[in-house]
Image (cartoon, rainbow, N blue to C red):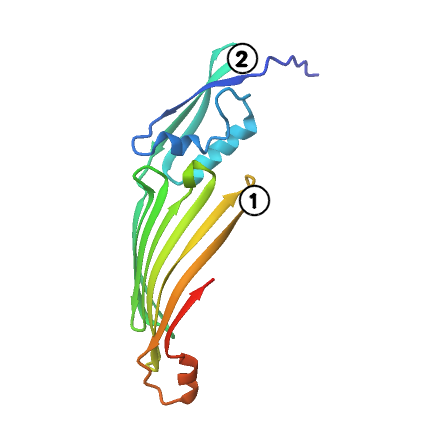
Amino acid sequence: TFQVSEGEPVRVRRINIYGNYKTRDKVIRREIRLNEQDLLNTNALKRSFQRLNNLNFFENVEIVPQEVKRGWVDLDVRIKEKPTGTFSIGGGYSSVDRLVGMVQVEQGNLFGRGQLLRLKAEIGQRLQNYTLTFREPWLFDKEISGTVDVYNQNLLYFSDYKEKRVGGDLIIGKAFTETVSGSVSYTLENVRIYDVTSADPLIIQQADLGNTLTSK
């Protein structure tokens, strides 16, 4: 037999953040699913903990309610930051691109703003690909993400002709619930076909010499 006497609802008086030497306060606060003056909610606390961990900016995250007076608590958010920059290098071989080398430099928390900046280069016997990516997860301080990719790609098709692609895309995403999100993208790309050396009429026809601008 359990005798239960419910107490008064508990509200959040203040949210205090400790340990963020690089990451800005607002980057952390916007992931917390409780506001000051809200009723304390266990599910919201758990989700806040998950969201902060999912950022991958922190080595450790703690959210501790501290009672300050009857019916009121302060939420102490204690974090331990970790390095968010990465450098990757690799290589491989395929029957199409032959030998390919890859170098990537990425900063996942640019200037402590939660933004992502990535530079990637792939260089091979038949392929040269350079991509620059920038992502803002909270565009205009709203729960809308914006991503811009700019790329320059050069391909050699089995010594028959060369193809150069220069373009970029813009991706706008929005979270509708904690588990449902959607995005829309726009791509503008210029394709140039040149240096056709094949004598095969079919390849020349497929190559479609010149420049083609694609908007999609």
Could you say which quadrant of the image residue 93 lies in? bottom left
Give the numbered dot on residue 180. 1
Q: Residue furthest top?
A: 70
- Residue 86 higher or lower than 49, as above or below: below
- The amino acid marked with disc number 1 is Val
- Determine the residue positioned at 47% across, 36% down: 51
- Residue 90 higher or lower than 1, as above or below: below
Q: Nearer the viewer, residue 77 or 127?
A: 127
The image position of residue 32, as x and y in percent, is 47, 30
- Residue 102 higher or lower than 52, as above or below: below
Q: Are marks 1 and 2 in contact (CB under 8 Å)?
A: no
The image position of residue 106, as x and y in percent, is 31, 49
The image position of residue 79, as x and y in percent, is 37, 30
CA–CA distance in space, label 1 to label 2: 34 Å
- The amino acid marked with disc number 2 is Gly
Could you say which quadrant of the image residue 191 lies in? bottom left
- Residue 207 higher or lower than 87, as above or below: below
- The numbered mark, 1 or 2, whose residue comes first in the sequence reads 2
Say which residue label 2 marks. 71
